[in-house]
Amino acid sequence: DTGVSQNPRHKITKRGQNVTFRCDPISEHNRLYWYRQTLGQGPEFLTYFQNEAQLEKSRLLSDRFSAERPKGSFSTLEIQRTEQGDSAMYLCASSLGNQETQYFGPGTRLLVL
Amino acid sequence: AQKVTQAQTEISVVEKEDVTLDCVYETRDTTYYLFWYKQPPSGELVFLIRRNSFDEQNEISGRYSWNFQKSTSSFNFTITASQVVDSAVYFCALSRGEAGTALIFGKGTTLSVSS
């Protein structure tokens, strides 16, 4: 039983560039979540999917952010026109259903120069 | 609004000491879940425990124990006989009831255990 995987693990980009992260949830988990964690803070919720439907988006998810889960399996999180304030750890989690425990991946650490 | 407060930013102990990490939460939901996660230096959040709002029984798992008290809105975590491998950031989190499942995290407590 493999855990949640995320790629890449690290990304350095220049301000203004677009970046895309991928998350592969635990097999058969129908819920997938994205969180962002900045230094010294707890993770903050961004969005979540049930199967391919995006059910909720946080106000933190600006227009430059978009997330997809096209076939209800893996998900991608894209940030367009990156800003230095986007530098953070982006965490993905999955769960078997509503109110079930969320299991987290190793995260993608983004640095915007 | 929901909120999780971990008032202890950093705790330092010597191996074999017992240590308690505090967590206080705020919610208007009658149904909710509380969690503890561990984040070692590698960065991955590791699930430790989940408790629902209707189950106030304390739980013990090896050297770990949890004390849930609805009367004080607290869900404290105690490590008995701490070890160096317990050094990590520990997060308490709250999930909403019927409305959704986004986790609301506290700011975390950094535990340093020295030998």
Image: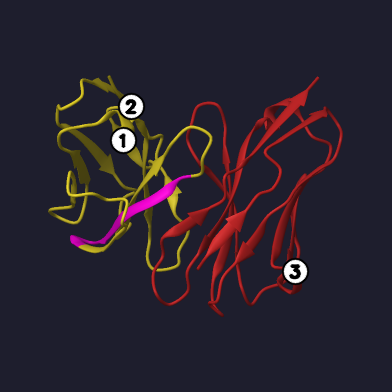
| Marking on residue B72 | 3
User: Left or right: B51 with respect to A106?
Assistant: right
A45 is higher (above) or lower (below) than B87: below
Q: Chain of mark 3?
A: B
Question: In which quadrant will I find the C terminus of chain A?
Answer: top left
Asked whether, in this view, residue A107 is left or right of residue A16, the answer is right
Q: Main secondary structure of the magenta part?
A: strand
Q: Which residue is mark 1?
A: A6
Mark drawn on residue A9: 2
**Observer-nearest of A25 and B68:** B68
State the residue at coordinates (45%, 64%).
A100
Q: Are marks 1 and 2 in contact (CB under 8 Å)?
A: yes
Residues A62 and B66: in front is A62
In the visual, does B44 lie left or right of A78? right
Magenta stretch in the rendered image: A43-53
Colour that chain A carries in the picture: yellow
- Chain letter for the red part: B
Secondary structure under tag 2 reads loop
- Residue at image location 27% in from the left, 27% down from the top: A8
Q: Amino acid at mark 1?
A: Gln
Q: Are marks 2 and 3 on the same chain?
A: no
Residue closest to the far bottom = B30
